């Protein structure tokens, strides 16, 4: 049975960087498209990034976040730079079998991790 486990969240200051990790068990990450979403208190779940050969990003993080897959470690890793207080949220990784264009939508994902908290505050 495939499982996704997020890690790397924590408390950082504005302008800092943070790298999250999502580890997959059961199958290699290359078998799926992998995406990240986030949800802040009182806000809708928001698309962050997805990778399936190429990568796409949500408008609010484009230019600051980079998503990549480490095939040796079987992890997917958002590198988050220039963090802002509005990046504060629970971040979730997920797996999809849909095309990259459709991976902006949460309904296309069949498996989700438990989430990791990212707090950006001075």
Image: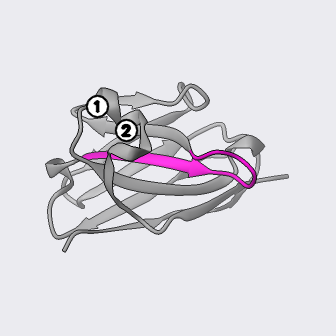
Q: Name the residue carrying label 2.
A: 50
Q: Residue furthest right?
A: 122
The residue lying toward the viewer, choosing from 84 and 16, is 84
Where does the image place residue 82, in percent across and percent down from the top left? 65, 36
71 relative position to 15: left or right: left
Position above or below: 41 against 98: below
Q: Name the residue carrying label 1.
A: 100
Where does the image place residue 55, in percent across and percent down from the top left? 34, 30
Kindly indicate whether the residue at mark 1 contacts the one at mark 2 (C-beta within 8 angstroms): yes
Looking at the image, which residue is at 30% across and 52% down?
Answer: 95
Position above or below: 7 against 30: below
Looking at the image, which residue is at 41% across and 65% down?
Answer: 113
40 relative position to 81: left or right: right
- The numbered dot on residue 43 is none
Q: Residue furthest front?
A: 107
Tell me the crowding category of disc 1: few under 14, some 14 to 19, or many 20 or more residues within 10 angstroms, Cα based: some
Q: Where, quadrant-wise, is the N terminus in this rendering?
A: bottom left
The residue lying toward the viewer, choosing from 23 and 1, is 1
Looking at the image, which residue is at 14% across and 63% down?
Answer: 27
122 relative position to 109: left or right: right
Looking at the image, which residue is at 39% across and 50% down?
Answer: 77
Q: Secondary structure at mark 2?
A: strand
Say whether residue 117 is magenta. no
Question: In the picture, residue 49 is in which quadrant?
Answer: top left
Where does the image place residue 44, in percent across and percent down from the top left? 64, 45
By what rule are the colours in the image chosen?
Answer: one colour
Region in magenta: 33-45
Question: In the picture, residue 59 is in which quadrant?
Answer: top right
Q: Secondary structure at mark 1?
A: helix
Say whether residue 38 is magenta. yes
């Amino acid at each position: 049975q495939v499982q996704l486990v997020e890690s790397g969240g924590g408390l950082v200051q504005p302008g800092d960087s943070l790298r999250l990790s999502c580890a997959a068990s059961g199958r290699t990450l290359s078998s799926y498209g992998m995406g990240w979403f986030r949800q802040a208190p009182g806000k809708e779940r928001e698309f962050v990034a997805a990778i399936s050969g190429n990568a796409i990003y949500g408008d609010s993080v484009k230019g600051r976040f980079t998503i990549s897959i480490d095939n040796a470690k079987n992890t997917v890793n958002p590198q988050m730079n220039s963090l802002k207080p509005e990046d504060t949220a629970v971040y979730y990784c997920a797996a999809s079998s849909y095309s990259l264009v459709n991976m902006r939508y949460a309904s296309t994902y069949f498996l989700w991790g438990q989430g990791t908290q990212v707090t950006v505050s001075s």
